[in-house]
Image (spheres, grey):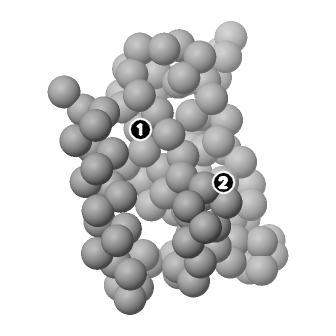
Amino acid sequence: MAIETTECPSNNKGGNSPLGNIPFLGIWGDHIYERGEEGNHPARLKSCKEMVKAIKKEGKVPAELIYLPEDLEMYGNSHIMMQDSNNEEIANIISSWLKNNIK
């Protein structure tokens, strides 16, 4: 579980992820591109998308990246989503994913 993590591992030898045996959920809010290169957020998001793709390719465990503005049309989240006004909704997204994907 990663919320706007600093970066996802990119050692994808042969398309495999070093985290290929670990279920993964990444959540990203908006304002990533508005921040520009400060903090390198666009590259961080890209690294996580690539890692999720590699984990899914291996097919051993569930992996998903939720980019809130694109995937759920949810806007206005900061980098620290647990302090945002919709933090309960974010918590419900995480809880639901865990219930549906972790056995």
Q: What residue is pinned by disc 2?
A: 45
Residue 35, numbered circle: none
Query: Which sits in the foreground, 92 or 54?
Result: 92
Compared to residue 56, the image places residue 5 above or below, namely: below
Query: Which sits in the foreground, 90 or 2?
Result: 90
Residue 44 seen in the current view:
no
Residue 24, numbered circle: 1
User: Residue 83 at what x, y percent from top left?
Assistant: 35, 84
Compared to residue 32, the image places residue 56 above or below, namely: above
Quadrant assignment, res 24: top left
Along the polypeptide, which appears first: circle 1 or circle 2? 1
Q: Residues under labels 1 and 2: Cα distance? A: 14 Å
- The secondary structure type at the circle numbered 1 is strand
Q: Quadrant of the C terminus?
A: top left
The amino acid type found where label 1 is placed reads: Phe
Query: Which sits in the foreground, 92 or 6?
Result: 92
Q: Is the residue marked by circle 2 packed among few (<14), some (14-19), or many (20+) residues within 10 Å?
A: many
* Residue at x 22% of width, y 41% of height: 99
Q: Is residue 11 left or right of residue 98?
A: right
* Residue at x 36% of width, y 28% of height: 22
- The secondary structure type at the circle numbered 2 is helix
The amino acid type found where label 2 is placed reads: Leu
* Residue at x 29% of width, y 65% of height: 91
Q: Is residue 16 left or right of residue 37?
A: left
Quadrant assignment, res 69: bottom right
User: Residue 5 at what x, y percent from top left?
Assistant: 50, 58
Q: Residue furthest left?
A: 103
User: Residue 3 at what x, y percent from top left?
Assistant: 45, 60
Q: Is residue 17 left or right of residue 22?
A: right
